[in-house]
């Protein structure tokens, strides 16, 4: 016979992981083909604003978000089809969870090449960001 106090001792190690599962922040928007930019203030929960609804890949969305970074934004995070995109001065990465492992989208050499092309487009447009249709990242 299992006594109630023994049962509690056996189940206690499961309590923390179960409690933490309920605290997982909301996921990234999953709308097909929509590239989102994170819009929030420090005192608010993160929100998302669509910047294009005609983006064909995570890479293209990351490049589109990179234009904000190139124009002076410290971070230009966003999301694409259920994945978060994180952009800062060190890397362009993605994760299926806000606090999950961040996988690089572009290697440093790829980012330098993409940035060169994006800066040329920004200059060509008089300082304005390129249109989503102007961005198509090719993997080599």
Image (cartoon, rainbow, N blue to C red):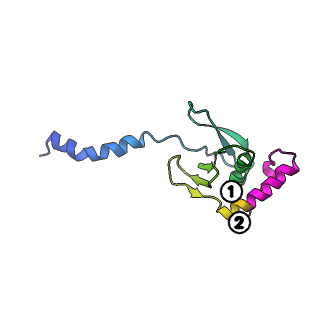
What residue is at 85 percent from the left and 50 percent from the top? 123
Place of residue 70 in the rendered image (x, y in percent of width and height, measured from the top left): 73, 49
Which residue bears the numbered disc 2? 139
Q: Give me the disc on residue 105.
A: none
Place of residue 91 in the rendered image (x, y in percent of width and height, measured from the top left): 62, 55
Instruction: Find the distance from the CA under tag 2 to the CA under tag 1.
Output: 9 Å
Instruction: Write down the region rendered in magenta.
Output: 113-133
Left or right of 117: which side holds 104?
left
Res 109 quadrant in image: bottom right
Screen quadrant of the C terminus: bottom right
* Residue 15 drawn in magenta: no
25 in relation to 104, above or below = above
Helix, strand or loop at mark 2: loop
Left or right of 126: which side holds 9?
left
Res 74 quadrant in image: top right
Res 59 quadrant in image: bottom right
Label located before the other in sequence (2 or 1): 1
115 in relation to 28, above or below = below
What residue is at 80 percent from the left and 51 percent from the top? 133
Helix, strand or loop at mark 1: helix
What residue is at 82 percent from the left and 44 percent from the top? 128
Place of residue 126 in the rendered image (x, y in percent of width and height, measured from the top left): 87, 45
Q: Give me the disc on residue 59.
A: 1
Q: Residues within 10 Å of mark 2 (few under 14, many from 20)?
A: few
Q: How many marks?
A: 2
Q: Residues within 10 Å of mark 1 (few under 14, many from 20)?
A: many
């Amino acid at each position: 016979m299992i006594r109630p106090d023994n049962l509690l001792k056996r189940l206690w190690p499961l309590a923390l992981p179960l409690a933490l599962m309920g605290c997982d922040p909301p996921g990234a928007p999953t709308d097909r083909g929509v590239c989102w930019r994170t819009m929030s203030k420090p005192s608010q929960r993160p929100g998302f604003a669509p910047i294009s609804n005609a983006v064909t890949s995570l890479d293209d969305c990351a490049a589109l978000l990179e234009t904000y970074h190139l124009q002076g934004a410290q971070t230009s995070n966003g999301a694409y089809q259920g994945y978060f995109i994180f952009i800062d001065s060190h890397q362009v990465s993605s994760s299926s969870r806000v606090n999950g492992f961040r996988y690089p989208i572009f290697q440093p050499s790829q980012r330098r090449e993409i940035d060169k092309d994006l800066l040329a487009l920004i200059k060509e447009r008089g300082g304005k960001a390129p249109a989503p249709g102007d961005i198509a990242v090719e993997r080599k």
